[in-house]
Amino acid sequence: MLHPYDNIELCYQILEIFTGAVSAVNCTGMWENKIVNVEAGQFAKFIISQRDMYGNAVFSKNSSDLVSFTAQVLKASDRQPVYTSVMSFQPWGDIPTESQVLTFQIWEEGSHFLQIKCGGENIYGSPFVFTCTHGKINLFFYEDSISFINQNNISYFFNENIMDLSV
């Protein structure tokens, strides 16, 4: 994989790779470990990959030049803001990095949306659906679906293809 500022030797010529400015619609995100549920009071982690208008990775050379993202958690039923504590963006992995991790803590049980923006525009796939439950969660994977049961034996089902969460 080529990285910005790599030099490539082709037919006795050197080609230097540069990336453009970050494009919100091409930035991607995913839950750490691809799990779309959060235990109330525990830290949730969402990883964002910085991309330019061509889909190339945009690397930050140090913490001070990380792309500025904003995040908000909304209740799925009425899209009203939900209180979260300790919400922060940090480099994901070693610097230079193309990714950031959003860490936050949520207490309100239920279905929620995580909305992430860059320059006022949603990143690709935003808002992202997730569920907050009380107690430990047992996960069961089947094809493209995930089902889980919390300590109160309440069963949830999530299918990525239909982007629906049903109880």
Image: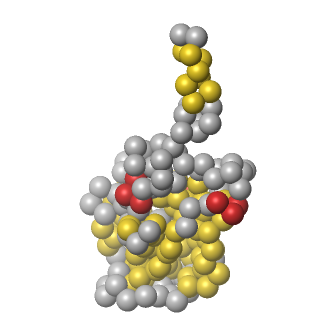
Task: State the image coordinates of residue 107 (x, y, percent, origin top left).
Answer: 56, 86
Q: Is residue 144 visible?
A: yes
Q: Is residue 121 above or below residue 10?
A: below
Q: Nearer the viewer, residue 86 or 50?
A: 50
Q: Is residue 32 visible?
A: no
Q: Residue at x 57, y 30 (%)?
A: 16
Task: State the image coordinates of residue 6 (x, y, percent, origin top left).
Answer: 62, 32
In the orientation shown, which residue stands out farthest toward the front? Answer: 13
Tell me the quarter of the image containing the N terminus. top right
Tell me if 51 is positioned left or right of 45 in this view. left
Tell me the quarter of the image containing the C terminus. bottom left
Q: Residue at x 53, y 10 (%)?
A: 11
In the orientation shown, which residue stands out farthest toward the left? Answer: 162
Q: Is residue 71 above or below residue 142?
A: below
Q: Nearer the viewer, residue 162 or 115?
A: 115
**Number of numbered callouts drawn:** 0
Q: Nearer the viewer, residue 134 or 59?
A: 59
Task: State the image coordinates of residue 12 (x, y, percent, origin top left).
Answer: 58, 11
Q: Nearer the viewer, residue 107 or 24?
A: 24
Q: Residue at x 52, y 54 (%)?
A: 50
Tell me if 26 is positioned left or right of 50 in this view. left
Task: State the image coordinates of residue 149 (x, y, percent, origin top left).
Answer: 47, 71
Tell me if 69 is positioned left or right of 90 in this view. left
Q: Is residue 15 above or below residue 128?
A: above
